[in-house]
Image (spheres, helix red, strand yellow):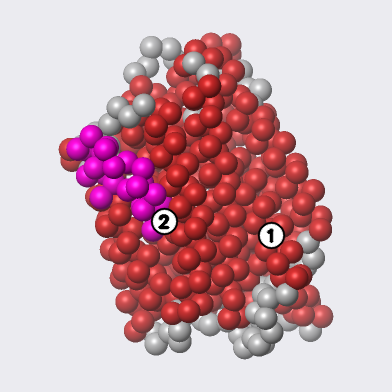
Amino acid sequence: MSAIADTDLTESRPLDRRDAKTLVLSALGGALEFYDFVIFAYFAKTLGHLFFPPGTSDWVAQLQAFSIFAVGYLARPLGGLVMAHFGDRVGRKRMFTLSVFLMAIPTLIIGVLPTYASIGVLAPVLLTLLRIVQGIAIGGEVPGAWVFVAEHVPRHRVGLACASLSAGLTVGILIGSLLAAALNARLSEAEMLDHGWRIAFLLGGVFGFFAVYLRRWLSETPVFARMRERKELATELPAWVVLRDHLPSVVLSMVVTWVLTAAIVVVILMTPTLMQTAFHVAPARAFAGGSLAALALCIGCVLGGLLVDWQGKARAMLVGSLGLAVSTYALYLDLVAGGSNLFPLYALAGLFAGVAGIVPAVLVAAFPPAIRFSGISLSYNIAYAIGGAATPVLVGYLAKSAGGLGPAHYVGLVALVGVGSAIYMMRQRETP
């Protein structure tokens, strides 16, 4: 596993105002963009009924909508590789701004898209195409954002920097969850089907264009500027260099990304909907629990980053993975028993889903600066395409099996993989 080059980041200086400005603006822009990507999940049940033939059962409608949600993950590698190529060649900032612009446009269009009742089968086709564009955008956004903030701060604060960005992304999930909860509380089911769901997507389009504006105030990373000045930029195709010279780092990065996928997609994004369909929890209560978990996730990401800077990536990954498995089982066992402790247990699961704040530090350290964007993008997006595309459909099916514990079994299995990755890093004699 490649380490961050000694000359890559300033080691001794503390965080300053410029660092704080970069972290805040990056996190806020990321929150607005990630809201656009995940809001689909919170309205999966509604979209399933509106964009597919009428008369479909709740469970089948949900499964169909989750399938379109998953398509966005399949599109991530394409956007990630193209944006990463130019990010390693022409600059991090340009791609950082382009990705959020590409997210805002399809989100806005979804908000005005005709449904199946108006245009028939063309409705799910158009929804799928727009979801693909969203996937392309997010494929460049997340790896580019981690690289961007990591290359702006001192090396001993990379964990906190990446985690703060991840927390910003999860704020986007929190905004989506709060809005979904508010709309479901204020509007009737008929009103949600009529126009309520459109409000969420139209707001997302506005959020996206505001994020584009915010990123005008950011500057190129010092690491990239220094490489460009010294003519140290990659001369070969960056993705080829990654596969040829850094395959062990690619494998490790894909494995830890799988853990992140389980934490975010299953625990945070899917569980509020699964509560309603598999455990018959009232929508308002399910989304309120989801909002609490999303808030806990934001806190967990920051705590995970601090743990990385304090104890190292391997130990942090070990703690996060074990906590994710235990807390998810506790949540689903409680749901099977009636959900009397839903709020505290969902908050605990959300806190340990903060392993998502530990993963980016592993990815950033795995690749040298000249091909870092491409290395992270290739590993992260391919792993997310596989795990993210299969997970919604698989977990949606598992929710009907194993006495309702199917989703917890899946998260537990993936968390064990995370434990294995932590042990591997320890054996590589990682320096805390």
Along the line of sight, the residue nearer the viewer: 330 or 110: 330
Whether residue 52 is visible: no
Residue 397 higher or lower than 145, as above or below: above
Q: Residues within 10 Å of mark 1 (few under 14, many from 20)?
A: some
Q: For the residue labelled by badge 2, is the local secondary structure a helix, a strand or a loop?
A: helix
Q: Nearer the viewer, residue 343 or 147?
A: 343
Q: Which mark is residue 351?
A: 2
Magenta residues (range): 330-353
Residue drawn at x 64%, y 52% is 30
Left or right: 94 in relation to 55: right
Q: Position of residue 57 (x, y in %)?
A: 34, 18
Task: Classify mark 1: helix, strand or loop.
Answer: helix
- Return the x and y of residue 319 as percentages of the image width and height: 35, 69
Q: Was residue 22 drawn as part of the magenta stretch in this picture?
A: no
| Residue found at x 66% / y 67% | 149
Q: Is residue 349 magenta?
A: yes
Q: Answer with mark 1 or mark 2, whichever residue precedes in sequence.
A: 1
Count how many numbered circles sit on residues in the image.
Answer: 2
Q: Amino acid at mark 1?
A: Val
Compare residues 277 and 94 and report the one nearer the observer.
277
Instruction: Please name the residue that numbered disc 1 is placed on.
Output: 24
Q: CA distance from mark 1 to mark 2?
A: 21 Å
Residue at 43% across, 62% down: 355
Question: Looking at the picture, how far across and down is residue 136, in whole percent?
Answer: 61, 47
**Secondary structure, magenta segment, majority class:** helix
